[in-house]
Image (spheres, rainbow, N blue to C red):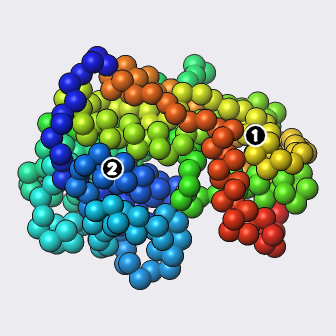
Amino acid sequence: MTGTIVDKEKKKVLIVNTNSGGHAVIGFYFAKELLGAGHEVTILTVGEESSDKMKKPPFNRFSEIVSAGGRTVWGDPAEVGKVVGGVAFDVVLDNNGKDLDAVRPVIDWAKSSGAKQFLFISSAGIYKPTDELPHVEGDVVKADAGHVGVEKYIAEVFGVWAVFRPQYMIGSGNNKDCEEWFFDRIVRDRPVPIPGSGMQLTNISHVRDLSSMLTLAVEKPDAACCNIFNCVSDRAVTLDGMAKLCAQAAGRPVNIVHYDPKAVGIDAKKAFPFRNMHFYAEPRAAKDILGWRCATNLPEDLKERFDEYVKIGRDKKQCSLR
């Protein structure tokens, strides 16, 4: 199916973007890639333009979207029609809501306003833990997860839709500490405490891979239609491996210390940026259906992130490390 015809029509795309967390950078990259391909883009960010959140990446780089010809607006997604001034769109992406209460107003408005395609950023975190990894599309999900209810409703309402389940991501403009957690300790010659054996496998993708997958869905709507895509890179990395790659990017040695969270009374969910378990998915559907190819190069991507880490002076800032 990789030979599917690409829709050459230039689309009007609305991105409803979260104002917090690691997913915000997805909308930023997606907007820039769409604009580069000649599409019209409006990005609606939750909240107010004057809020302190907008002083942080990726929001403080939204001028890059505007200079490329895009439109940026702020407001409440529940009043999306009012916020965008009654403009109609060919494609709507919700990169904000985590449950049906949050996303239903956007879905219903998109349907009533004549949108032809609806895309939704879900989460690979909805997969049930399994002994058979990696997670692939079609694996059992947690029935009570908020994202699952959204996915089901989209399939009921829209004729042309696609769902994307990302995992951990990396890339310039990301404001969620993951690699920075390792850098903070490595540059200060502090131990890097990793729960368990450190051999747990996870998946980290450059956000440009996520945006390229989304763009393919816009340009191949018939192929993408009614499919769920694991929006991830095609390689896994161990937790120890992540620490070593971060040290390599920083040009410093690393002192990894393993610990048993229960034995030392530490909640690993709060103390460590990744899940203390094997947690990784495979982008099988995107490769087979969309002809997508992964471009994540974790060693090189971490060098880019470390250069930014130093550029903003974080390596010199005082910080409290556990």
Q: Within 10 Å of the Cα at label 1, are there few (<14), some (14-19), or many (20+) other Cα atoms?
A: many
Residue visible at 72% across and 32% down?
A: 238
- Residue toward you, 281 or 314: 314
Q: Secondary structure at mark 2?
A: helix
Identify the residue under disc 2: 36
The x and y percentages for residue 291 are 36, 24
- Residue toward you, 280 or 232: 232
Residue 202 circle label: none
The x and y percentages for residue 114 are 8, 51
- Residue toward you, 183 or 125: 183
Residue visible at 41% across and 82% down?
A: 50
**Residue 258 appears in which quarter of the rendering?**
top right
Q: How many marks?
A: 2
Residue 245 circle label: 1
Residue visible at 58% across and 48% down?
A: 170
Question: Tag 1: residue type?
Answer: Leu
* Residue 25 higher or lower than 205, as above or below: below
